[in-house]
Amino acid sequence: MKREIHSITELPEVARELLETFPGDRFFAFYGKMGVGKTTLIKELCRYLGVTDNVCSPTFAIVNVYSDRNGEPVYHFDFYRLKNIDEAYDIGYEEYFYSGAYCFTEWTEKIEPIMPDRYVRIEITESASVRTLIATAIG
C-alpha cells in the first residue's frame, strides 16, 4: 500500500485503509523521523478501533495500553528512549507482541532483532508538505 497524505484530515481514511488492507495483521511497526506523524496516525488507528482513551506517545512509559470498542487491549509502544534491547526484555515484550492484540510500535528499529516473524512495516517520509506512507506486510 502506498499513499500520499496532503492533510491531517485524510488520516481517518488512511487508518481505515491500513486496517482493511491488512485485516489479519495485528503488529504494525512504524518507521520515520521525529515529527513525521507516527503518533498522530496511531491516534487515528486507535480511534478507528473504537479506543476512547487518551492516545498519546508512551515515550517515557515505553508502552501505553488502551481498550478498543470490545474491551480488548491495544498496545502502543515508543522505543525512542530504549537504551538497549534488554529493556524490551525487561518489560516482557513477548506477552504484548504475541498476545493477538493490536500492537503499534514507534522507533521500531531499536527492537528489530525481537520483532515477530509477521508484521506490517509502515514507513512515513516527508517532502515539503506531503507525507508518503508505504505499508508492506513482512513475513
Image (cartoon, rainbow, N blue to C red):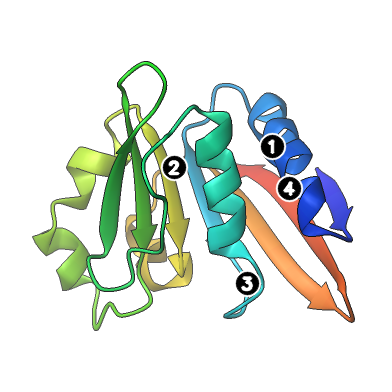
According to the picture, the residue beneath numbered tag 3 turns out to be: 32
Q: Earlier in the sequence, mark 4 or mark 1?
A: 4
Label pair 2/4, CB-CB below 8 angstroms: no
Frontmost residue, 130 versus 111 = 130
Residue drawn at (71%, 48%) of the image: 135
- Give the Cα separation between the discs numbered 3 and 4: 16 Å
Frontmost residue, 118 versus 56 = 56
Left-right relation of 94 to 2: left
Please state the total of marks drawn on the protein image. 4
Crowding at mark 4 (Cα within 10 Å: few <14, some 14-19, many 20+) = some
Left-right relation of 24 to 94: right
Give residue 68's position: percent from left, percent from top: 39, 27
Residue drawn at (35%, 57%) of the image: 77
Q: Which quadrant holds the N terminus?
A: top right
- Tell me which amino acid carries mark 4: Leu
- Give the Cα separation between the discs numbered 4 and 1: 10 Å
- Give the Cα separation between the discs numbered 1 and 2: 19 Å
Determine whether 37 is above or below 66 in the image: below
Task: Kindly tell me whether residue 139 is visible in this rendering.
Answer: no
According to the picture, the residue beneath numbered tag 2 turns out to be: 117
- Tell me which amino acid carries mark 1: Leu
Label pair 3/1, CB-CB below 8 angstroms: no
Q: Tell me, for residue 18, which label it has, or none.
A: 1
According to the picture, the residue beneath numbered tag 4 turns out to be: 11
Residue drawn at (37%, 16%) of the image: 70
